[in-house]
Amino acid sequence: MFQRLSERLQAVLKKLRGHGRLSEENIAEALREVRLALLEADVHYKVVKDFISRVQERAVGREVLQSLTPGQQVMRVVFEELTTLLGGRCSGLSYGASPPSVVMLVGLQGSGKTTTAAKLARLIKSQGRLPLLVAADTRRPAAGEQLQILGEEVGVEVYRQSHAAPLSICQEAVQHAKSKGLEPVLLDTGGRLHIDETLMAELTALQKALAPAEVLLILDAMSGQDALTAATKFHSTLDLTGFILTKLDGDARGGAALSITSVTGRPIKFVGVGEGLDALEPFHPERMASRILGMGDILSLVERAEAAAERLRAEELARKIRQEAYTLEDFREQLLQVRRMGSIEELIGMFPGLPKGSGEVEVDGKALVRMEAILSSMTREEQRNPAIINGSRRKRIAKGSGTSVAEVNQLLRQFQQIQRVMRQVLRAGQKGRPTSHKGRWGFPIA
């Protein structure tokens, strides 16, 4: 998402930063290119017009033109306005004054609403709450069964009634949640077209009877301007409180994400960044703007790393490093944690100066998969004691992993390098001298 837009905007701003002084003509020319880039990204034309007007008004001011670094000042203006366009600040879930709060999830058919409901329940549970999932989709065959399976997978209770109207199911679910101290109540309503007046009236009746703290529309970010049309129609009927965008990890142009808040006045609250049930994140406008402009997103990278690593496992790893007992078995576990954080290309895009698809860094996205295959083809004894891996064992490992002996040898050499770095860091720490080592891309690793 946003790859082409990101490349275009970064090229324009890089050209501006190359000028020692800027004139109104320089800025006007650059903003014409920015306008084209946004329109190509499928951003609504009125949103583009307003955005360019705001940037131009600020960029030709005295503060920018008389600055010692006018190019950087323009970039700051674009960053701030892009952040505003995306919503300004992170907007979490709202909860009602008297529990249990109700969160009503609505959307078009096929927008991934049921899966997103389970993802949201998992995220809320990780924050220390006890949500209740409610199967309120009585029209789609097996919708309740799907939600039940997903609920069991994320460890959240699911409320179902096979022969009842959606309103009755939801009202009973709220009473059930109140009696068991569960909050919030997540209503997985049936998917519907925004032009179906009968089904939209059903949602209106649910909203009126339950007074939900949140009414969130789930939209497929890949659907472009159709998503914006649906958002406008749903909002005019239900007075939405926010949006959840799915498939933000896809290759769509991203116009919906850049237009939706400006058009409706409602924030994007969460984004789906993968197929896994853990792949739902709060939406941070300033971080997304930073990534689009090639300024990186270190905070999101750190949060993903923290979520992927369990505290006890990290302590155990630290103990092994201190005792110089780090093995290939530990190495494999770390590779799995990195893969759970997302694709290598996506993670690289979070580093400042290394935007995804920029061509500045060559990344073999399948390298971790091959390494994991090699490690999985080793016996437990070989993983714990690499010294016993002789020539015949290397041939067997290569055959079992679908790789070559040369790749097996390369992995073993890399592991030996990691062990050496860890020993050096440990000795430096014992002597009280900080040591840093540069990784493949020049970033310090410790």
Image (cartoon, grey):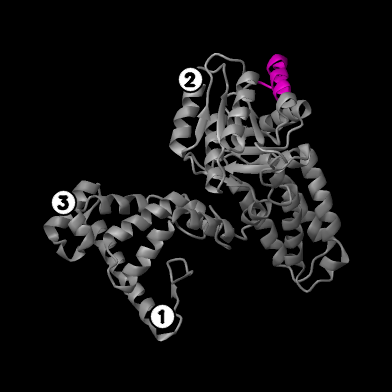
Residues rendered magenta in the picture: 193-206
Q: Which corner quadrant holds the C terminus?
A: bottom left
* C-alpha gap between disc 3 and disc 1: 39 Å
Q: Which of the labelled discs sits on residue 142, or is there none? A: 2
Query: Closer to us: mark 3 or mark 2?
Result: 2
Badge 3: few (under 14), some or many (20 or more) residues near its Cα, within 10 Å? some
Residue at 48%, 57% in the rendered image: 305
Left or right: 356 in relation to 325: right
Task: Check the image and report above or below for 401 versus 156.
Answer: below
Task: Check the image and report above or below for 17 versus 32.
Answer: below
- Do labels 3 and 1 touch, CB within 8 Å? no
Type of residue at label 3?
Arg
Magenta part, dominant SS: helix
Q: Quadrant of residue 349?
A: bottom right
**Mark 1: which secondary structure?**
helix
Query: Closer to us: mark 3 or mark 1?
Result: 1
Type of residue at label 1?
Gly
- Please name whichever residue, 248 or 167, is drawn nearer the observer in this view of the structure: 167
Query: Residue 355 at what x, y percent from top left?
Result: 56, 57
How many marks the image carries: the answer is: 3
Query: Residue 220 at what x, y percent from top left?
Result: 60, 33
Going from N to C along the chain, the mark reached first, 3 or 2, is: 2
* C-alpha gap between disc 3 and disc 2: 46 Å
- Please name whichever residue, 352 or 265, is drawn nearer the observer in this view of the structure: 265
**Mark 3: which secondary structure?**
helix
**Mark 2: which secondary structure?**
loop
Q: Which of the labelled discs sits on residue 429, or is there none? A: 1
Residue at 62%, 43% in the rendered image: 270
Q: Is 117 within the magenta?
A: no
Task: Check the image and report above or below for 267 versus 192.
Answer: below
